[in-house]
Image (cartoon, rainbow, N blue to C red):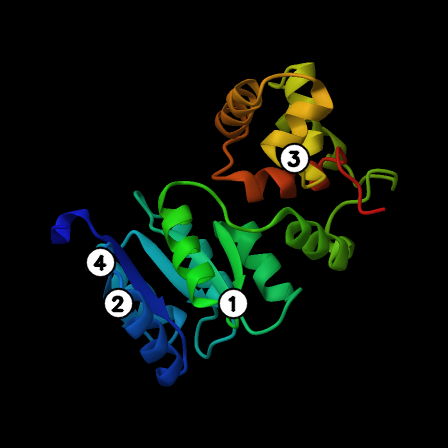
Amino acid sequence: MTAAERIRVFLVDDQQMVRGGFRMLVDSQPDLEVVGEAGDGAEALERLAVTRADVVLMDVRMPRLDGVEATRRLAERPDAPRVLVLTTFDLDEYAFAAIRAGAAAFLLKDAAPEDLLGAIRTVHAGDSVVAPSTTRRLLEQFAAVVPDPHAEPRPGQREARDDRLAPLTEREREVLTLVGRGLSNTEIAAELVVAETTVKTHVGRLLAKTGSRDRVQLVVLAYETGLARTT
């Protein structure tokens, strides 16, 4: 495999030993290579301005500039790399915020090496790697920051939520609701009694119509608009 064919990975963590461990793991794979690293979000933004990367392994709790703000600023750049958020704590509110800021994935630092490597490849392929159960737990844990569909909306709040759903067909809303509940494409197909390829088509259209980067953001959208509930 040539260098041009390898997935370029950039490491962001304030602990040098952690970065060293990730570097050894990533560089041990023939299809992956570490192209750079940084000790905080500010340094990462500087280096990624001149370093081409496909996937960024991003810690969330760092000095100077944390991973949430770094992810947000990266997402605003053209041809931004995909961000895989790494955290020590399950149900980390910072990780949830990073996902809302544009991260494509969420993974615990103590994940098995094969899971991390698989996550890098999956994220690079354009998919998300947050397991449905993890997505649900994240949203349930921090439901306080997600609008309550039964609460009296602030001026303009309901209109803003409805506008995001306006382009969707009734079937697409059904699919978005099921995505928000954490169902896989196979499970959605069984629920709606359609082919899995049909579900994939609907998900693709949902991504395009809502401007969502991946399935994770569709889940967040489903909760924010009230299609999915935390109870």
Placement of 3 over or under 158, stated as above or below: below
Q: Residue furthest left?
A: 2
Disc assigned to residue 193: none
Circles 1 and 2: CB atoms closer than 8 Å: no
Using a 10 Å C-alpha cutoff, classify the residue at mark 1 as few (fewer than 14 neighbours), some (14 to 19) or many (20 or more).
few
Q: Amino acid at mark 2?
A: Ser
Q: CA distance from mark 1 to mark 2?
A: 17 Å
Report the mark closest to the observer, 3 or 4.
Answer: 4
Disc assigned to residue 30: 4
Q: Residue at x 30, y 72 (%)?
A: 23
Q: Identify residue for label 2.
A: 28
Q: CA distance from mark 1 to mark 3?
A: 24 Å
Q: Amino acid at mark 3?
A: Val
Nearer-N-terminus badge (4/1): 4
Q: Identify residue for label 1.
A: 111
At mark 2, the secondary structure is loop
Q: CA distance from mark 2 to mark 4?
A: 7 Å
Task: Give x and y (percent) for residue 205.
Answer: 51, 22
Report the mark closest to the observer, 2 or 3.
Answer: 2
Task: Give x and y (percent) for residue 194.
Answer: 64, 16
Using a 10 Å C-alpha cutoff, classify the residue at mark 3 as few (fewer than 14 neighbours), some (14 to 19) or many (20 or more).
many
Q: Identify residue for label 3.
A: 179
Task: Give x and y (percent) for residue 13.
Answer: 40, 75
Q: Residue at x 59, y 65 (%)?
A: 94
Circles 1 and 3: CB atoms closer than 8 Å: no
* Res. 172 image quadrant: top right
Q: Confirm whether residue 184 shows in the render.
A: yes
Q: Amino acid at mark 4?
A: Pro
Placement of 14 over or under 165, stated as above or below: below
